[in-house]
Amino acid sequence: MAGAFYLSTIGQIMKWARSRSLWYISTGTACCADEVLDTMGCRYDLERFGCLPQVDPRQADLLIVCGMVSYKAAPHLKNLYENMLAPKYVLAVGACANCGGPFSPEFSYSVVAGADQIIPVDVFVPGCPPRPEAIMNGLIALQEKICGQESSHF
């Protein structure tokens, strides 16, 4: 059974490495995008978690959805998600991306009631707008989810 131990250890190392090197692409349409930009800045520094911004979705494995998603933008968001290579993860940031926020379908006819109606979301970050600390906690929760650990952050 030494081979089984070796494969399980290699699998754990691969999960750990994958969770610590998340290259992301971000969509930002509202004030939550400003908070993500703050999180990328030198005070909070997402790069210390191994998160690097990418331009091409084929190079990214994390999609950060910030702000509301309109019905007109929904096909483009789905196309962006489908162009990402597997394994791929989604972080929905803010009340607008989670449930429509103040632009929810009860008040507006043009906004989707959450990004999870279009693409599968792994971690929801609450807030309107969420603080950079909350975005970092969401990222840590995603890292724990990738490693297969029980998340205690949300």
Image: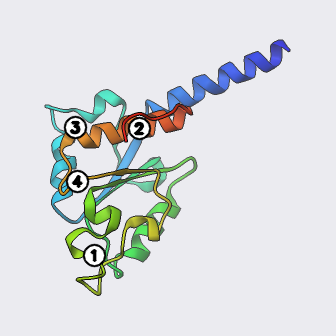
Question: Of residues 91 and 27, which is closer to you in this image?
Answer: 91
- Quadrant location of the C terminus in the rendered image: top left
Q: Earlier in the sequence, mark 2 or mark 4?
A: 4
**6 displayed left or right of 125:** right
Camera-nearest label, 4 or 3: 4
Q: How many marks?
A: 4
Quarter holding residue 100: bottom left
Query: What amino acid type should be assigned to the residue bearing mark 4?
Result: Gly
Q: Earlier in the sequence, mark 4 or mark 3?
A: 4
Query: What amino acid type should be assigned to the residue bearing mark 3?
Result: Glu
Q: Earlier in the sequence, mark 2 or mark 1?
A: 1
Quickly name the residue at label 1. 104
Which mark, residue 127? 4
> In the rendered structure, are the residues bearing label 2 and label 4 in contact, judged by CB atoms less than 8 Å apart?
no
Report crowding for label 2: few under 14, some 14 to 19, many 20 or more residues within 10 A (C-alpha). many
Which mark, residue 133? 3
At which x and y percent is residue 24?
38, 46
Question: Of residues 98 and 84, which is closer to you in this image?
Answer: 98
Q: Say which residue appears at 31% left-offset and 37% top-offset.
A: 137
Quickly name the residue at label 2. 141
